[in-house]
Image (cartoon, rainbow, N blue to C red):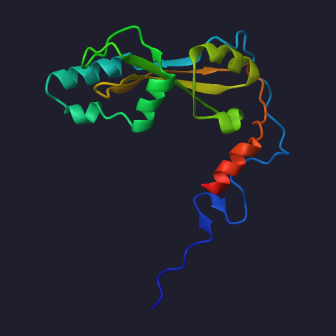
């Protein structure tokens, strides 16, 4: 006897329909933003960081639970990180870095990439809205922690830029 037949609907998207919004739909109205380079909706994770460090140093957690940076994050810190200006809270090493990632639908193929802090003002004037994530990383002990997030952008909705041809060819060969 055959097993149960799979449904034609997976998740919330019916077969034959795209989960991406149609290009013909109008964009939402612009959000009033006085300064596109000023962070909006900031979230600071300092209290969670302090609680994690307290648990770590008082025997409540194993070092493998905190010092577990992904190899890609370590490479991003090595090649694109910016000095944090302080020592690592775990091993006191001076090679302590901040890595800044940007995410947003309007960024298109550039979403999820590492950016330097000095590039953010130009990005904020070029895109309506995107979220910035700042992660601290120690290359020696592999400590990593999300320290803050915020939103940047000029508030004018835009369609995502097209994927460059060379990136399409790379994805097709993978």
Looking at the figure, which quarter contains the C terminus?
Answer: bottom right
Res 16 → quadrant: bottom right
Res 162 → quadrant: top right
Q: Is residue 82 above or below residue 10?
A: above
The answer to whether residue 105 of the structure is visible from this angle is: no
Res 58 → quadrant: top left
Query: What residue appears at the point 63 percent right and 71 percent down from the top-left corner?
Result: 8
Query: What residue appears at the point 62 percent right and 66 percent down from the top-left corner?
Result: 9
Residue 147 vs residue 117, the one in the foreground = 117
Question: Residue 99's spot in the image, x, y percent?
Answer: 48, 23
Residue 43 vs residue 124, the one in the foreground = 124
45 left or right, relative to 50 = right
Query: What residue appears at the point 31 percent right and 16 percent down from the top-left corner?
Result: 88
Looking at the figure, which quarter contains the N terminus?
Answer: bottom left
Q: Is residue 169 above or below residue 44?
A: below
Question: Residue 93's spot in the image, x, y percent?
Answer: 29, 15
In the image, farthest residue toward the bottom: 1
153 left or right, relative to 53 = right
Query: What residue appears at the point 39 percent right and 37 percent down from the top-left corner?
Result: 70
């Amino acid at each position: 006897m055959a097993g149960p037949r799979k449904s034609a609907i997976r998740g919330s998207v019916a077969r034959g329909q795209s989960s991406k919004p149609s290009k013909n739909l109008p964009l939402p109205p612009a959000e009033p933003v006085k300064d596109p380079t000023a962070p909006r909706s900031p979230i600071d994770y300092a209290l969670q960081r302090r609680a994690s460090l307290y648990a770590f140093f008082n025997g409540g957690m194993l070092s493998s639970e905190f010092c577990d940076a992904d190899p890609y994050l370590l490479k991003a810190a090595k090649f694109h990180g910016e000095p944090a200006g302080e020592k690592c809270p775990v091993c006191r090493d001076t090679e302590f870095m901040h890595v800044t990632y940007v995410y947003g639908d309007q960024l298109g193929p550039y979403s999820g990439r590492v950016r330097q802090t000095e590039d953010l003002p130009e990005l904020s004037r070029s895109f309506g809205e995107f979220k910035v994530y700042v992660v601290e990383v120690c290359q020696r002990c592999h400590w990593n922690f999300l320290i803050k997030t915020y939103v940047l952008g000029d508030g004018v909705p835009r369609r995502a830029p097209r994927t460059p041809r060379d990136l399409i060819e790379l994805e097709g060969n993978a």
